[in-house]
Image (spheres, grey):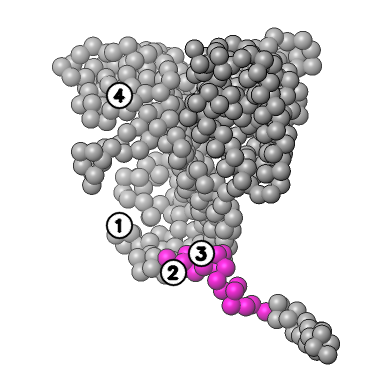
Amino acid sequence: MRRLLATTVLVTTLPGLAAAQDRPSLLDYFSLEVITQRMMQMGIMALRTQVDMKYSDISVDFYTGGITMTDVVAWPLPEWDTDGNCEVAIDRITLRAGALDEVDRLRSKMLVSGLSFPASCLPREPREALGMAGLSNVEIPRLTLDIDYGLPSSDATIRAYADITDVAIADLSAHFTYAWFDGRNDIEQPDPVMFLDHATLALENRGIWQALSGQLPPPFTGDGSGMFLVGMVGEGLKGENPGDADLSESQLAFTKSLGETWPAFVANPDTLVLETHIDGDSFLDFEAMGDDLRVVFDTLRPQLSLAPARVRDILPVSLLQASGSDISAEDRKKLGIALISGIGAPRNAAEGTRLLGGLAEAGDGEAAMAMAEAAEHKAPEEAYRWALLAGSADQKGATAMLDRLERKIAFARVLELQAEVSGGDKNSGAVLEKLSATRNEAAMRLSGRGQARSYEIAAMWAMIAAAAGDPEAADILEQLDERARLSGDAAQAAWATAEASASAKATEAWISQDLPARFGE
Protein backbone atom coordinates (compact mmCIF):
# COMPACT_ATOMS: atom_id res chain seq x y z
CA MET A 1 0.00 0.00 0.00
CA ARG A 2 2.83 2.39 0.89
CA ARG A 3 4.60 1.66 -2.42
CA LEU A 4 1.37 2.38 -4.31
CA LEU A 5 0.90 5.64 -2.41
CA ALA A 6 4.48 6.73 -3.06
CA THR A 7 4.15 5.95 -6.76
CA THR A 8 0.89 7.92 -6.95
CA VAL A 9 2.44 10.95 -5.24
CA LEU A 10 5.45 10.85 -7.56
CA VAL A 11 3.32 10.63 -10.70
CA THR A 12 1.06 13.47 -9.64
CA THR A 13 3.93 15.78 -8.63
CA LEU A 14 6.17 15.29 -11.68
CA PRO A 15 4.12 17.65 -13.91
CA GLY A 16 4.30 20.30 -11.21
CA LEU A 17 8.06 19.89 -10.87
CA ALA A 18 8.51 20.15 -14.63
CA ALA A 19 6.42 23.30 -14.71
CA ALA A 20 8.39 24.72 -11.80
CA GLN A 21 11.62 24.21 -13.72
CA ASP A 22 10.32 26.61 -16.36
CA ARG A 23 10.31 29.39 -13.79
CA PRO A 24 13.30 30.96 -11.96
CA SER A 25 13.99 29.37 -8.60
CA LEU A 26 15.84 30.53 -5.53
CA LEU A 27 18.85 28.49 -6.68
CA ASP A 28 19.00 30.55 -9.87
CA TYR A 29 19.44 33.68 -7.78
CA PHE A 30 22.50 32.18 -6.07
CA SER A 31 24.24 31.02 -9.27
CA LEU A 32 27.77 32.36 -9.70
CA GLU A 33 26.83 34.13 -12.93
CA VAL A 34 23.96 36.01 -11.29
CA ILE A 35 26.04 36.93 -8.24
CA THR A 36 28.85 38.23 -10.45
CA GLN A 37 26.41 40.22 -12.55
CA ARG A 38 24.81 41.75 -9.45
CA MET A 39 28.22 42.78 -8.14
CA MET A 40 29.04 44.33 -11.51
CA GLN A 41 25.78 46.24 -11.49
CA MET A 42 26.49 47.55 -8.00
CA GLY A 43 29.92 48.71 -9.19
CA ILE A 44 28.31 50.54 -12.11
CA MET A 45 25.84 52.22 -9.78
CA ALA A 46 28.77 53.46 -7.68
CA LEU A 47 30.59 54.60 -10.84
CA ARG A 48 27.56 56.63 -11.88
CA THR A 49 28.18 58.95 -8.95
CA GLN A 50 31.30 60.10 -10.87
CA VAL A 51 30.38 59.50 -14.54
CA ASP A 52 26.93 59.45 -16.11
CA MET A 53 26.60 56.28 -18.17
CA LYS A 54 24.15 53.73 -19.54
CA TYR A 55 24.28 50.43 -21.42
CA SER A 56 21.92 47.95 -23.04
CA ASP A 57 23.08 44.62 -21.60
CA ILE A 58 25.56 42.81 -19.34
CA SER A 59 26.42 39.14 -19.86
CA VAL A 60 28.59 37.01 -17.59
CA ASP A 61 30.50 33.82 -18.40
CA PHE A 62 31.88 32.56 -15.11
CA TYR A 63 33.81 29.67 -16.68
CA THR A 64 35.88 31.87 -19.01
CA GLY A 65 36.04 34.70 -16.47
CA GLY A 66 34.42 37.16 -18.84
CA ILE A 67 31.98 40.05 -18.37
CA THR A 68 30.63 41.82 -21.46
CA MET A 69 28.75 45.11 -21.71
CA THR A 70 27.19 46.32 -24.95
CA ASP A 71 26.06 49.71 -26.26
CA VAL A 72 27.78 51.72 -23.54
CA VAL A 73 27.46 55.50 -23.54
CA ALA A 74 29.17 57.72 -20.95
CA TRP A 75 29.32 61.46 -20.28
CA PRO A 76 32.46 62.09 -18.17
CA LEU A 77 32.03 65.91 -18.14
CA PRO A 78 35.74 66.87 -17.97
CA GLU A 79 36.49 70.34 -16.63
CA TRP A 80 37.80 71.63 -19.99
CA ASP A 81 34.58 70.66 -21.78
CA THR A 82 32.58 73.74 -20.87
CA ASP A 83 29.83 72.99 -23.42
CA GLY A 84 29.27 69.42 -22.23
CA ASN A 85 29.84 67.89 -25.68
CA CYS A 86 32.05 65.01 -24.52
CA GLU A 87 30.20 61.74 -25.12
CA VAL A 88 32.09 58.44 -25.10
CA ALA A 89 30.43 55.57 -26.96
CA ILE A 90 31.50 51.91 -26.91
CA ASP A 91 29.82 49.21 -28.98
CA ARG A 92 31.15 46.36 -26.85
CA ILE A 93 33.53 46.03 -23.92
CA THR A 94 34.69 42.74 -22.43
CA LEU A 95 36.57 42.38 -19.16
CA ARG A 96 38.24 39.01 -18.69
CA ALA A 97 40.05 37.31 -15.86
CA GLY A 98 41.54 33.83 -16.19
CA ALA A 99 39.38 30.85 -17.11
CA LEU A 100 38.06 28.72 -14.27
CA ASP A 101 40.66 25.99 -14.82
CA GLU A 102 43.64 28.39 -15.11
CA VAL A 103 44.65 28.27 -11.46
CA ASP A 104 48.36 29.00 -12.08
CA ARG A 105 47.88 32.26 -13.98
CA LEU A 106 46.41 35.64 -13.13
CA ARG A 107 44.98 37.42 -16.13
CA SER A 108 43.35 40.78 -16.61
CA LYS A 109 42.20 41.63 -20.12
CA MET A 110 40.04 44.38 -21.58
CA LEU A 111 38.70 44.20 -25.13
CA VAL A 112 36.97 47.27 -26.49
CA SER A 113 35.20 47.42 -29.86
CA GLY A 114 33.80 50.54 -31.49
CA LEU A 115 35.15 53.23 -29.13
CA SER A 116 34.50 56.80 -30.27
CA PHE A 117 34.51 60.28 -28.73
CA PRO A 118 34.83 63.90 -29.94
CA ALA A 119 37.94 66.05 -29.57
CA SER A 120 36.24 67.92 -26.72
CA CYS A 121 36.93 64.93 -24.45
CA LEU A 122 40.69 65.58 -24.70
CA PRO A 123 42.81 68.17 -22.87
CA ARG A 124 44.09 71.16 -24.83
CA GLU A 125 47.43 69.80 -26.11
CA PRO A 126 46.12 66.43 -27.40
CA ARG A 127 43.10 68.27 -28.84
CA GLU A 128 45.40 70.61 -30.77
CA ALA A 129 47.48 67.66 -32.02
CA LEU A 130 44.27 66.02 -33.23
CA GLY A 131 43.34 69.22 -35.04
CA MET A 132 46.75 69.30 -36.76
CA ALA A 133 45.94 65.85 -38.11
CA GLY A 134 42.69 67.22 -39.51
CA LEU A 135 40.46 65.20 -37.17
CA SER A 136 37.61 66.33 -34.93
CA ASN A 137 36.67 62.89 -33.56
CA VAL A 138 38.58 59.86 -32.34
CA GLU A 139 37.40 56.47 -33.56
CA ILE A 140 39.04 53.30 -32.26
CA PRO A 141 37.56 50.15 -33.82
CA ARG A 142 39.61 47.91 -31.50
CA LEU A 143 41.45 48.46 -28.23
CA THR A 144 43.12 45.72 -26.17
CA LEU A 145 44.85 45.83 -22.80
CA ASP A 146 46.16 42.48 -21.57
CA ILE A 147 48.19 41.51 -18.48
CA ASP A 148 49.05 37.83 -18.09
CA TYR A 149 50.94 36.83 -14.92
CA GLY A 150 52.23 33.35 -14.11
CA LEU A 151 52.31 32.44 -10.43
CA PRO A 152 54.80 29.52 -10.58
CA SER A 153 57.69 31.40 -12.24
CA SER A 154 56.48 35.01 -11.72
CA ASP A 155 56.70 35.67 -15.45
CA ALA A 156 54.48 38.34 -17.00
CA THR A 157 53.38 39.48 -20.42
CA ILE A 158 51.88 42.93 -20.99
CA ARG A 159 50.28 43.96 -24.26
CA ALA A 160 48.41 47.02 -25.46
CA TYR A 161 46.89 47.45 -28.91
CA ALA A 162 44.96 50.35 -30.41
CA ASP A 163 43.64 50.80 -33.93
CA ILE A 164 42.87 54.52 -34.38
CA THR A 165 40.98 55.30 -37.58
CA ASP A 166 42.85 57.63 -39.99
CA VAL A 167 45.72 57.94 -37.52
CA ALA A 168 47.76 54.82 -36.68
CA ILE A 169 47.84 51.34 -35.20
CA ALA A 170 49.90 51.11 -32.02
CA ASP A 171 51.01 47.72 -30.73
CA LEU A 172 53.04 47.49 -27.50
CA SER A 173 54.18 44.21 -25.96
CA ALA A 174 56.64 43.31 -23.22
CA HIS A 175 57.60 39.99 -21.69
CA PHE A 176 59.21 39.71 -18.26
CA THR A 177 60.88 36.50 -17.10
CA TYR A 178 60.37 37.69 -13.50
CA ALA A 179 58.20 40.49 -12.15
CA TRP A 180 57.32 41.22 -8.54
CA PHE A 181 58.24 43.51 -5.65
CA ASP A 182 60.89 43.61 -2.91
CA GLY A 183 59.41 44.77 0.38
CA ARG A 184 62.28 43.90 2.68
CA ASN A 185 63.25 47.55 3.13
CA ASP A 186 59.78 49.10 3.02
CA ILE A 187 56.73 46.82 2.76
CA GLU A 188 54.41 49.80 2.23
CA GLN A 189 56.43 51.07 -0.75
CA PRO A 190 58.15 47.99 -2.17
CA ASP A 191 60.71 48.23 -4.94
CA PRO A 192 59.89 46.58 -8.28
CA VAL A 193 62.02 43.56 -9.21
CA MET A 194 61.76 43.01 -12.95
CA PHE A 195 63.78 41.08 -15.53
CA LEU A 196 62.83 42.07 -19.07
CA ASP A 197 63.20 39.53 -21.85
CA HIS A 198 61.80 41.48 -24.79
CA ALA A 199 59.74 44.59 -25.59
CA THR A 200 58.37 45.95 -28.86
CA LEU A 201 56.51 49.12 -29.84
CA ALA A 202 55.19 49.10 -33.41
CA LEU A 203 53.47 52.12 -35.00
CA GLU A 204 51.71 51.51 -38.30
CA ASN A 205 50.79 54.56 -40.34
CA ARG A 206 47.07 54.88 -41.05
CA GLY A 207 47.05 58.54 -42.09
CA ILE A 208 49.03 60.37 -39.44
CA TRP A 209 52.14 60.64 -41.66
CA GLN A 210 50.19 62.15 -44.54
CA ALA A 211 48.68 64.70 -42.14
CA LEU A 212 51.94 65.71 -40.45
CA SER A 213 54.72 65.19 -43.02
CA GLY A 214 53.92 68.44 -44.82
CA GLN A 215 54.52 70.38 -41.60
CA LEU A 216 58.02 68.93 -41.01
CA PRO A 217 61.09 70.97 -42.11
CA PRO A 218 62.93 69.63 -45.21
CA PRO A 219 65.88 68.15 -43.25
CA PHE A 220 63.49 65.61 -41.71
CA THR A 221 62.06 64.37 -44.99
CA GLY A 222 64.53 65.26 -47.77
CA ASP A 223 67.77 63.72 -48.95
CA GLY A 224 70.18 63.13 -46.09
CA SER A 225 67.40 62.96 -43.49
CA GLY A 226 69.02 59.89 -41.94
CA MET A 227 72.37 61.59 -41.37
CA PHE A 228 70.60 64.70 -40.10
CA LEU A 229 68.70 62.70 -37.46
CA VAL A 230 71.80 60.75 -36.46
CA GLY A 231 73.61 64.00 -35.73
CA MET A 232 70.70 65.69 -34.00
CA VAL A 233 69.71 62.73 -31.83
CA GLY A 234 73.34 61.88 -31.09
CA GLU A 235 74.02 65.37 -29.80
CA GLY A 236 70.85 65.26 -27.76
CA LEU A 237 71.81 61.96 -26.13
CA LYS A 238 75.33 63.17 -25.41
CA GLY A 239 73.90 66.25 -23.72
CA GLU A 240 71.80 64.03 -21.45
CA ASN A 241 74.71 61.77 -20.50
CA PRO A 242 76.45 62.66 -17.21
CA GLY A 243 79.26 65.12 -17.91
CA ASP A 244 78.41 65.20 -21.62
CA ALA A 245 80.07 61.79 -21.91
CA ASP A 246 80.47 60.20 -25.33
CA LEU A 247 77.75 57.91 -26.57
CA SER A 248 77.88 54.36 -25.27
CA GLU A 249 77.96 51.36 -27.62
CA SER A 250 74.21 50.82 -27.22
CA GLN A 251 73.48 54.51 -27.91
CA LEU A 252 75.62 54.40 -31.05
CA ALA A 253 73.75 51.26 -32.19
CA PHE A 254 70.44 53.08 -31.69
CA THR A 255 71.49 56.16 -33.69
CA LYS A 256 72.86 53.93 -36.45
CA SER A 257 69.53 52.08 -36.71
CA LEU A 258 67.75 55.45 -36.79
CA GLY A 259 69.92 56.64 -39.67
CA GLU A 260 69.25 53.48 -41.67
CA THR A 261 65.53 53.12 -40.92
CA TRP A 262 64.19 56.68 -41.16
CA PRO A 263 64.97 57.31 -44.87
CA ALA A 264 63.42 53.92 -45.73
CA PHE A 265 60.28 54.87 -43.81
CA VAL A 266 60.06 58.28 -45.52
CA ALA A 267 60.27 56.53 -48.90
CA ASN A 268 57.55 54.05 -47.92
CA PRO A 269 55.74 55.33 -44.79
CA ASP A 270 54.23 52.13 -43.44
CA THR A 271 55.56 50.89 -40.08
CA LEU A 272 58.16 51.99 -37.54
CA VAL A 273 59.29 49.56 -34.82
CA LEU A 274 61.23 50.33 -31.65
CA GLU A 275 62.47 47.04 -30.20
CA THR A 276 64.83 45.81 -27.51
CA HIS A 277 67.81 43.66 -28.49
CA ILE A 278 68.54 41.95 -25.18
CA ASP A 279 70.63 38.78 -25.05
CA GLY A 280 68.68 36.66 -22.55
CA ASP A 281 66.99 38.89 -20.01
CA SER A 282 68.01 42.12 -18.31
CA PHE A 283 67.42 43.40 -14.79
CA LEU A 284 65.66 46.77 -14.75
CA ASP A 285 67.52 48.88 -12.19
CA PHE A 286 65.13 51.83 -12.12
CA GLU A 287 67.23 53.85 -9.69
CA ALA A 288 70.37 53.63 -11.86
CA MET A 289 68.34 54.18 -15.03
CA GLY A 290 66.96 57.41 -13.57
CA ASP A 291 70.45 58.74 -12.86
CA ASP A 292 72.23 57.81 -16.10
CA LEU A 293 70.66 57.68 -19.57
CA ARG A 294 73.44 55.35 -20.72
CA VAL A 295 72.17 52.70 -18.28
CA VAL A 296 68.75 52.90 -19.94
CA PHE A 297 70.24 52.17 -23.35
CA ASP A 298 72.68 49.55 -22.04
CA THR A 299 69.78 47.76 -20.29
CA LEU A 300 67.17 47.89 -23.06
CA ARG A 301 69.46 48.10 -26.14
CA PRO A 302 66.70 49.66 -28.29
CA GLN A 303 66.93 49.81 -32.06
CA LEU A 304 64.64 51.15 -34.77
CA SER A 305 63.51 49.05 -37.72
CA LEU A 306 60.72 48.68 -40.27
CA ALA A 307 59.40 45.34 -38.94
CA PRO A 308 59.45 43.53 -35.58
CA ALA A 309 61.63 40.48 -35.08
CA ARG A 310 58.57 38.19 -35.05
CA VAL A 311 57.85 39.25 -38.65
CA ARG A 312 61.45 38.78 -39.70
CA ASP A 313 61.31 35.25 -38.24
CA ILE A 314 58.54 34.15 -40.63
CA LEU A 315 59.67 31.01 -42.42
CA PRO A 316 60.37 31.30 -46.16
CA VAL A 317 58.05 29.59 -48.62
CA SER A 318 60.93 27.43 -49.82
CA LEU A 319 61.14 25.76 -46.40
CA LEU A 320 57.38 25.11 -46.36
CA GLN A 321 57.57 23.59 -49.83
CA ALA A 322 60.43 21.34 -48.73
CA SER A 323 58.48 19.88 -45.79
CA GLY A 324 57.62 16.73 -47.73
CA SER A 325 61.20 16.02 -48.79
CA ASP A 326 64.42 15.25 -46.97
CA ILE A 327 65.52 18.29 -44.97
CA SER A 328 68.05 18.70 -42.18
CA ALA A 329 67.05 17.91 -38.61
CA GLU A 330 67.49 21.58 -37.70
CA ASP A 331 65.15 22.77 -40.46
CA ARG A 332 62.71 19.96 -39.65
CA LYS A 333 62.49 21.11 -36.04
CA LYS A 334 62.23 24.79 -36.99
CA LEU A 335 59.43 24.06 -39.46
CA GLY A 336 57.65 21.60 -37.18
CA ILE A 337 57.58 24.00 -34.22
CA ALA A 338 56.33 26.81 -36.48
CA LEU A 339 53.53 24.64 -37.85
CA ILE A 340 52.45 23.25 -34.51
CA SER A 341 52.50 26.65 -32.77
CA GLY A 342 51.20 28.73 -35.67
CA ILE A 343 54.06 31.24 -35.27
CA GLY A 344 56.14 31.71 -38.40
CA ALA A 345 53.80 29.61 -40.55
CA PRO A 346 50.04 28.92 -40.66
CA ARG A 347 49.14 26.45 -37.93
CA ASN A 348 49.00 22.83 -39.06
CA ALA A 349 49.20 20.60 -36.00
CA ALA A 350 49.04 17.33 -37.95
CA GLU A 351 51.94 18.24 -40.25
CA GLY A 352 53.93 19.72 -37.35
CA THR A 353 53.48 16.49 -35.38
CA ARG A 354 54.61 14.45 -38.36
CA LEU A 355 57.80 16.49 -38.64
CA LEU A 356 58.58 16.56 -34.93
CA GLY A 357 57.55 13.05 -33.92
CA GLY A 358 60.72 11.30 -35.04
CA LEU A 359 62.91 13.99 -33.46
CA ALA A 360 61.07 13.68 -30.14
CA GLU A 361 61.35 9.90 -30.17
CA ALA A 362 65.09 10.27 -30.81
CA GLY A 363 65.51 12.42 -27.69
CA ASP A 364 64.94 16.01 -28.84
CA GLY A 365 63.35 17.56 -25.76
CA GLU A 366 62.42 20.84 -27.45
CA ALA A 367 60.47 19.01 -30.15
CA ALA A 368 58.71 16.80 -27.60
CA MET A 369 57.81 19.78 -25.42
CA ALA A 370 56.37 21.71 -28.37
CA MET A 371 54.04 18.81 -29.17
CA ALA A 372 53.09 18.36 -25.52
CA GLU A 373 52.15 22.04 -25.19
CA ALA A 374 50.09 21.92 -28.39
CA ALA A 375 48.13 18.87 -27.22
CA GLU A 376 47.77 19.66 -23.49
CA HIS A 377 44.20 20.97 -23.61
CA LYS A 378 43.00 19.01 -26.64
CA ALA A 379 44.43 15.53 -26.09
CA PRO A 380 45.76 15.11 -22.51
CA GLU A 381 46.92 11.50 -22.97
CA GLU A 382 48.84 12.36 -26.12
CA ALA A 383 50.35 15.38 -24.39
CA TYR A 384 51.34 13.20 -21.42
CA ARG A 385 53.28 10.85 -23.65
CA TRP A 386 55.21 13.69 -25.29
CA ALA A 387 55.84 15.30 -21.90
CA LEU A 388 57.36 12.01 -20.69
CA LEU A 389 59.83 12.18 -23.56
CA ALA A 390 60.51 15.88 -22.95
CA GLY A 391 61.21 15.17 -19.27
CA SER A 392 63.54 12.34 -20.22
CA ALA A 393 65.53 14.90 -22.24
CA ASP A 394 65.61 17.20 -19.18
CA GLN A 395 63.43 19.81 -20.91
CA LYS A 396 62.32 22.63 -18.61
CA GLY A 397 58.59 22.63 -17.83
CA ALA A 398 58.02 18.96 -18.65
CA THR A 399 57.61 17.72 -15.08
CA ALA A 400 55.17 20.54 -14.26
CA MET A 401 53.07 19.51 -17.26
CA LEU A 402 53.16 15.86 -16.17
CA ASP A 403 51.82 16.87 -12.76
CA ARG A 404 49.03 18.95 -14.32
CA LEU A 405 48.00 16.18 -16.70
CA GLU A 406 47.96 13.54 -13.97
CA ARG A 407 45.14 15.51 -12.35
CA LYS A 408 43.09 14.85 -15.50
CA ILE A 409 44.11 11.29 -16.42
CA ALA A 410 43.10 8.22 -14.40
CA PHE A 411 45.98 6.74 -12.39
CA ALA A 412 45.66 3.33 -14.08
CA ARG A 413 45.94 4.98 -17.48
CA VAL A 414 48.96 7.00 -16.29
CA LEU A 415 50.73 3.75 -15.48
CA GLU A 416 49.88 2.39 -18.94
CA LEU A 417 51.22 5.52 -20.69
CA GLN A 418 54.41 5.38 -18.64
CA ALA A 419 54.88 1.71 -19.59
CA GLU A 420 54.41 2.54 -23.28
CA VAL A 421 57.33 5.00 -23.10
CA SER A 422 59.61 3.21 -20.61
CA GLY A 423 58.61 -0.43 -21.05
CA GLY A 424 61.53 -1.14 -23.37
CA ASP A 425 64.14 0.66 -21.26
CA LYS A 426 67.09 -1.50 -20.26
CA ASN A 427 68.11 -1.22 -16.63
CA SER A 428 71.80 -0.39 -16.38
CA GLY A 429 73.83 -2.45 -13.95
CA ALA A 430 75.90 0.66 -13.20
CA VAL A 431 72.98 1.99 -11.18
CA LEU A 432 73.61 -0.80 -8.66
CA GLU A 433 77.28 0.03 -8.16
CA LYS A 434 76.52 2.47 -5.33
CA LEU A 435 73.51 2.86 -3.08
CA SER A 436 73.34 6.60 -3.78
CA ALA A 437 73.15 5.94 -7.53
CA THR A 438 70.25 3.52 -7.01
CA ARG A 439 68.38 6.07 -4.91
CA ASN A 440 69.03 8.86 -7.43
CA GLU A 441 67.70 6.70 -10.26
CA ALA A 442 64.52 6.07 -8.27
CA ALA A 443 64.16 9.81 -7.64
CA MET A 444 64.61 10.65 -11.35
CA ARG A 445 62.03 8.06 -12.35
CA LEU A 446 59.65 9.50 -9.79
CA SER A 447 60.08 13.11 -10.94
CA GLY A 448 60.43 12.48 -14.67
CA ARG A 449 63.36 14.83 -15.19
CA GLY A 450 66.49 13.30 -16.71
CA GLN A 451 64.64 10.01 -17.15
CA ALA A 452 61.12 9.32 -18.40
CA ARG A 453 58.75 9.25 -15.43
CA SER A 454 57.81 5.67 -14.50
CA TYR A 455 56.30 4.87 -11.13
CA GLU A 456 56.90 1.14 -11.61
CA ILE A 457 60.60 1.58 -12.38
CA ALA A 458 60.90 4.14 -9.58
CA ALA A 459 59.40 1.58 -7.19
CA MET A 460 61.84 -1.12 -8.35
CA TRP A 461 64.92 1.02 -7.68
CA ALA A 462 63.43 2.38 -4.44
CA MET A 463 62.69 -1.16 -3.18
CA ILE A 464 66.35 -2.10 -3.67
CA ALA A 465 67.68 1.03 -1.97
CA ALA A 466 65.14 0.89 0.85
CA ALA A 467 66.05 -2.76 1.49
CA ALA A 468 69.64 -1.59 1.96
CA GLY A 469 68.49 0.88 4.61
CA ASP A 470 68.20 4.11 2.59
CA PRO A 471 65.51 6.32 4.20
CA GLU A 472 65.04 8.54 1.11
CA ALA A 473 64.21 5.49 -0.99
CA ALA A 474 61.72 4.35 1.63
CA ASP A 475 60.10 7.78 1.41
CA ILE A 476 59.78 7.40 -2.38
CA LEU A 477 57.90 4.13 -1.86
CA GLU A 478 55.65 5.83 0.67
CA GLN A 479 54.88 8.61 -1.82
CA LEU A 480 53.93 6.11 -4.51
CA ASP A 481 51.72 4.10 -2.16
CA GLU A 482 49.98 7.25 -0.96
CA ARG A 483 49.40 8.48 -4.51
CA ALA A 484 47.69 5.22 -5.42
CA ARG A 485 45.68 5.11 -2.19
CA LEU A 486 44.30 8.60 -2.65
CA SER A 487 43.35 7.89 -6.28
CA GLY A 488 40.66 5.30 -5.50
CA ASP A 489 40.05 1.56 -5.73
CA ALA A 490 40.80 1.25 -9.46
CA ALA A 491 44.13 3.02 -8.97
CA GLN A 492 45.07 0.75 -6.07
CA ALA A 493 44.28 -2.35 -8.15
CA ALA A 494 46.43 -1.09 -11.01
CA TRP A 495 49.22 -0.15 -8.63
CA ALA A 496 49.14 -3.60 -7.01
CA THR A 497 49.92 -5.14 -10.40
CA ALA A 498 52.72 -2.65 -11.13
CA GLU A 499 54.12 -3.03 -7.62
CA ALA A 500 54.22 -6.82 -7.96
CA SER A 501 56.17 -6.51 -11.20
CA ALA A 502 58.59 -4.04 -9.61
CA SER A 503 59.04 -6.31 -6.59
CA ALA A 504 59.85 -9.33 -8.77
CA LYS A 505 62.52 -7.38 -10.69
CA ALA A 506 63.98 -5.90 -7.50
CA THR A 507 64.17 -9.31 -5.83
CA GLU A 508 65.82 -10.86 -8.88
CA ALA A 509 68.49 -8.13 -8.93
CA TRP A 510 68.92 -8.36 -5.15
CA ILE A 511 69.75 -12.08 -5.37
CA SER A 512 71.56 -12.32 -8.72
CA GLN A 513 73.84 -9.36 -7.98
CA ASP A 514 74.32 -10.31 -4.32
CA LEU A 515 73.45 -6.76 -3.35
CA PRO A 516 73.54 -7.41 0.42
CA ALA A 517 77.25 -8.15 0.11
CA ARG A 518 77.88 -5.19 -2.22
CA PHE A 519 76.00 -2.57 -0.19
CA GLY A 520 77.21 -4.03 3.10
CA GLU A 521 80.89 -3.55 2.31
**Cα–Cα gap, marks 4 and 1:** 36 Å
User: Residue 36 got which mark?
Assistant: 3
Q: Residues within 10 Å of mark 3 (few under 14, many from 20)?
A: some
Magenta segment boundaries in residue numbering: 23-43
Q: Residue at x 33, y 59 (%)?
A: 78
Q: Which callout, 1 or 2, points to the residue nearer the camera?
A: 2
Q: How many marks?
A: 4
**Label 1: how many residues lie within 10 Å, few (<14), some (14-19) or many (20+)?**
few
Find disc 2 in the rendering and name its residue.
42
Majority SS type along the magenta span: helix
Q: Nearer the viewer, mark 4 or mark 2?
A: 2
Q: Quadrant of residue 281?
A: top left
Query: Alpha-carbon distance for marks 3 and 1?
Result: 36 Å
User: Residue tagged by mark 1?
Assistant: 80
Compared with residue 414, is residue 3 higher up or lower down, i.e. above or below?
below
497 and 422: which is toward the camera: 497
Q: Is residue 27 magenta?
A: yes
Whether pointer 1 and pointer 2 mark residues with C-beta atoms closer than 8 Å, the reply is no
Position in image of residue 235 (x %, y %): 25, 17
Secondary structure found at label 2? helix
Q: Name the residue beneath numbered marker 4.
A: 296
Q: Position of residue 305 (x, y in %)?
A: 47, 20
Question: Which amino acid type is shown beneath numbered disc 1?
Answer: Trp
Nearer to me, 201 or 475: 475
Q: Nearer the viewer, residue 353 or 390?
A: 390
Q: Tag 2: residue type?
A: Met
Q: Helix, strand, or loop for circle 3?
A: helix
Q: Position of residue 420 (x, y in %)?
A: 74, 28
